[in-house]
Image (cartoon, helix red, strand yellow):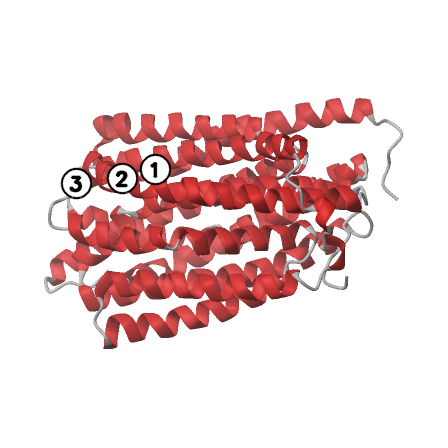
Amino acid sequence: MQSVKNMTSGSPLRILFSFALPLMVGNVFQQLYTLVDSMVVGNKLGLSALAAIGNGEWLNWLVLSLIQGFTQGFSIRLAQNFGANDIEKLKKTYATSLKLSVLCTAGILCFAFAILSPVLRLLNTPDEIFPTTVTYLSVIFAGIPIVMAYNFLASVLRALGDSKTPLKAMIVASLCNIALDLLFVMVFEWGVAGAALATLIGQAVSAVICYLSLRKIEIIRTEKSQRRFDKSIAVKLLKLAMPFAFQNVIISVGGLVVQFVINGYGVLYIAGFTATNKLYGILEIAAISYGFALTTYVGQNYGARQIKRITKGVHTGALMGIATSAVISAAMFVFGSYIVGAFISSENPSDAAAAIDIAYHYLCIMAAFLPILYLLHIYRSSLQGLGDTVMPMVSGGAELVMRITTIIFLPMLIGTEGLFWAEVLAWAGADVVLLSSYYVKMARIKRAYKDKCIE
C-alpha cells in the first residue's frame, strides 16, 4: 500500500510537484535515449538515415498515440474509483481494462502493419530513404505488445498515485537502451533496425519493473469473481478511452500532413525538422508530467467530490506550467543550436550547416511560444480527469485544422518561413477549445456541488 497516494488532501502545489517530479526525471531519461538514438544514427549512418527515422516519426506516433489513448483513458476511471474509495469497483475496473488492453493490442498490431507501406507512399517519402524507414518502423511495430504492456502498467500505477515506479523503470530502460544503441549500431552495425531493437528491449525492461511493483499493491489483487469481463464497465471504459484515442489519431493525421509537405522540400528539410522534433520531447517533458499529475489529481478529487480543491489544483498547475516553460525556452535559445548540431552529420559541410540552420530556426519559434503548449497539457489533462474526453478530442480537431491550414497555405504567403509555424498555431487552436471547455464544465459542476469545499 505504501506506493499508492491519495491526492484528496494536502497542499495541491506540494502534491502536484511531488507527483510530477519523478515523471519529469523519468521523461528526461526517456528523452535521453531518444536523443542518443538520433545522435548515434545521425553521426554513424548520416543525414539520410536520420531523415528516414524522422520521416516515420508521425506514423510511429499515430500507433503509439492509439496505445496511450486507450491506456490513459482506462486509467481515468481507475483514478476516480480510487478517489471515491470504491475498492470493489476499482478491482473490477482493473480486470476489465486489462482484458480490453489485450484486445486493443491485437487490433493495433494488425492496423499498424496494414498501413505501413501505403501511408509512407502517400507521404511522398523520397525513394532514397523509403526502405530504411520501412525497416525501422517494421521493428518498432513488431514490439507493439511490449509498448502496450508498459503503457498500461504505468498508467495504472499513476492512477493510484505512484509516479516513482515508472521513474525507476524509465531510468533502467534508458540506460539499457543507450548501451544497446551503442552496441547494436556502432559495434554490430545493424543500422536503424539496431536502434529500433534497442528501444524495444528498453521498453520490455520497463514493463517488467512496473509489473513487479503492481503485484505488490493489495487493493488491485482480484478474486475470481472480480476477474470476469464486465460489459457495463467495459462500455464506460471505452466511452472514456475511444475519444482519447481518436483525439490522438486526429493530431497524428495533422502531423502526417505536415510530414508530407516537408518531404517535398527534400532531405535537408526532413533532417532539420527531425533534429528539432527530437527535441520536442525535451520541450514538453514537464508539460506531460504536469498533465499526468493533474489527470490523477483531478480524477481522484472528482471521485471524492472535492470540487473547490480541483479548481485550486488546476490553477496551481497552470502557474507551474507557465513558469517552467519560461525556463526551458530560455535554455533552448542559449543552447539549442549546439544541441541540434549534435544530431546532424554529413560528408558535405554545407549540407550539415543548412540542416542545422533549419533545425535551430524551427526550435526558436517553438520555444518562444512554449507556454501555449504547457497550458494545452494542463487543461486537456484536467478535463480528462473530470471524465470529459470528448472536448479534448474536439481540441484535437482544432489542432488538425490549424496545422493543415498553416502548413498548406502559409508557405504560399511568406515562403518556407510558413513551414515553421504549423505547430505553434495548432497549439493555439487547441487552447481556445480547451480553456473555454474547462471553465464552462467547472461552472456546471460547481452549481451541482455547491456544498463541497477545500479543507
Report which residue position mark 2 lands on.
Answer: 259
Q: Which disc, if any, is residue 255? A: 1
Question: The residue under label 3 is which amino acid type?
Answer: Tyr
> Residue 396: horizontal and vertical position, in percent?
47, 30
Does residue 280 sit above or below 104 in this rendering? below
Q: Which mark is first along the chain, 3 or 1? A: 1
Question: The residue under label 1 is which amino acid type?
Answer: Gly
Circles 1 and 3: CB distance less than 8 Å? Answer: no
Report which residue position mark 3 lands on.
Answer: 265
> Residue 244: horizontal and vertical position, in percent?
53, 35
Does residue 131 sit above or below 249 in this rendering? below
Q: In this view, does 83 lie to the left or right of 264?
A: right
Check disc 1: other Cα within 10 Å, few if <14, some if 14-19, many if 20+.
Answer: many
Q: Can residue 279 be seen in this view?
A: yes
Q: Which mark is first along the chain, 3 or 2? A: 2
Does residue 4 sit above or below 159 in this rendering? below
Q: Distance between the residues labelled 2 and 3?
A: 10 Å
Question: The residue under label 2 is which amino acid type?
Answer: Gln
Q: In which quarter of the image is the N terminus?
A: bottom right
Circles 2 and 1: CB distance less than 8 Å? Answer: yes
Q: Is mark 1 on a helix, strand or loop?
A: helix
Viewer-closest of 363 and 159: 159
Residue drawn at point x = 45 percent, y = 40 percent: 66
Q: In this view, does 162 lie to the left or right of 286?
A: right
Badge nearest the viewer, 1 or 3: 1
Q: Distance between the residues labelled 1 and 3?
A: 16 Å
Viewer-closest of 72 and 317: 72
Asked which quadrant contains residue 88, the reply is top right
